[in-house]
Image: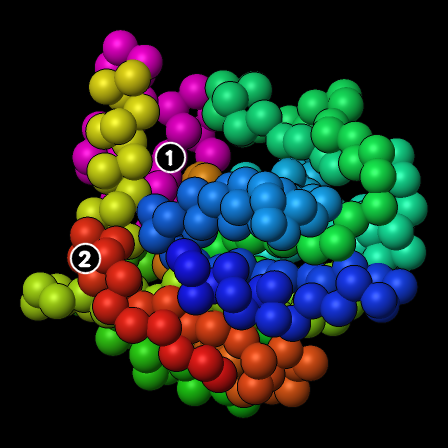
Amino acid sequence: MDSIVEHIVGHLDLNLSAPLFVAIQGPQGSGKSYLSAQLKHILSQSPHSLNVALLSIDDLYLPHDGLLRLATQEPLNPLWAGRGQPGTHDTKIGVEIMKKLKSRAVDVELPSFDKSLFNGEGDRLPSGIIIDKPVDVVILEGWCVGFYPISTEELSARWNGVWREEAMKLHLPDLVSKFDLERVNESLRSYTELWSFFDLFIQIKPMPQLPYPSQYSIIYKWRTQQEHNMKAANGGRGMPDASVKAYVDGFLTIATSGQLKNRYIPGYVFFGDIPPSTATPAWLGKSLKLLIDDERRQLEVKTF
């Protein structure tokens, strides 16, 4: 944590008219939300005493009616049957918020999304968090933060190569088509303006020490732990382990609606290159990669 704080503070210039924008990316259960909250807390306290705005990519999800509209417009695409994948976020409002924060505007409202509403489909709340003073640091965290669109040729190569390999290793159901992924790829173009605000990038990268069938297998373990912790705290309400796997795969069937809930594995495989191979972001050369083991213990911090 100290090295990350020092890195952020070292790149902060309070004489500049704009805040420092920091992206934090990591897979489900890796601790990115915890890290982001701790960074906000530490940077806000003495001796730094900075004004920090923290936003999750989850809070930029389309409102419930927008998610339903997207699912209706693309009824055969399981990746857009619910929130999760690129294409289910309101990038327009995200860019507007970033512009306001960059100008050090006051009374900026950060949206808030409640995932428990509509039987877990979620909805944007009527009001969010108000930033009532100019900020020094802006943190945006999320699982797909920094994902860029890839070329048609690269998508085809991954479809015929690494995707088939990972699908076999993880026993994924054959429900996603190449066209579904092409639609998600197209939607990522609207995210690049949002990513363009970043000055620094912090990636949490799993480096499992135990043998697993796939590099993505650890995500199932971490997400299952999250579900167990939640159920222990709320009296047992939550998904069984088998449903957690389907949730992460992207193919959890919701019994009340029969819809397929989109999630994460396809996004990691096709668009999860950090740094991206198709762009040269401003944060390259001044960012950090936090390597963690199976138990989320820090192994090493690298610059990239």
The part of the chain drawn in magenta is: 234-259
Q: Secondary structure at mark 2?
A: loop
Does residue 304 belong to the magenta stretch? Answer: no
Residue 128: % across, % down: 73, 28
To which quarter of the image does residue 208 belong? bottom left
Residue found 84% across the figure and 62% down from its top = 18
Residue 236, above or below 113: above
Amino acid type, callout 2? Asp
Crowding near the residue tagged with mark 2, few <14, some 14–19, many ≥20 C-alpha atoms within 10 Å? some
Picture residue at 27% right of the left edge, 62% below the top = 298
Q: Residues within 10 Å of mark 1 (few under 14, many from 20)?
A: some
Measured Cα–Cα span from mark 1 to mark 2: 28 Å
Q: Earlier in the sequence, mark 1 or mark 2?
A: 1
* Quarter of the N terminus within the rendering: bottom left
Q: Nearer the viewer, residue 100 or 58?
A: 100
What residue is rendered at 88% in x and 34% in y?
Answer: 107
Q: What residue did someone put label 2 on?
A: 294
Numbered badge on residue 253: 1
Q: Which residue is the extreme one toward the front? A: 47
Apparent side of residue 297 relative to residue 134 in the rendered image (left or right)? left
Say whether residue 209 is left or right of residue 73.
Answer: left
Look at 28% across and 31% down and name the residue there. 227
Which residue occupies the extreme left position in the image?
211
Q: Position of residue 204 (x, y in %)?
A: 40, 63
Q: Is residue 133 above or below residue 277?
A: above
* Circle 1: element type: strand
Q: Position of residue 75 (x, y in %)?
A: 59, 45
Camera-nearest label, 1 or 2: 2
Q: Please name the amino acid that badge 1 sits on.
A: Thr
> Can see residue 167?
no
User: What numbered label is drawn on residue 225?
Assistant: none
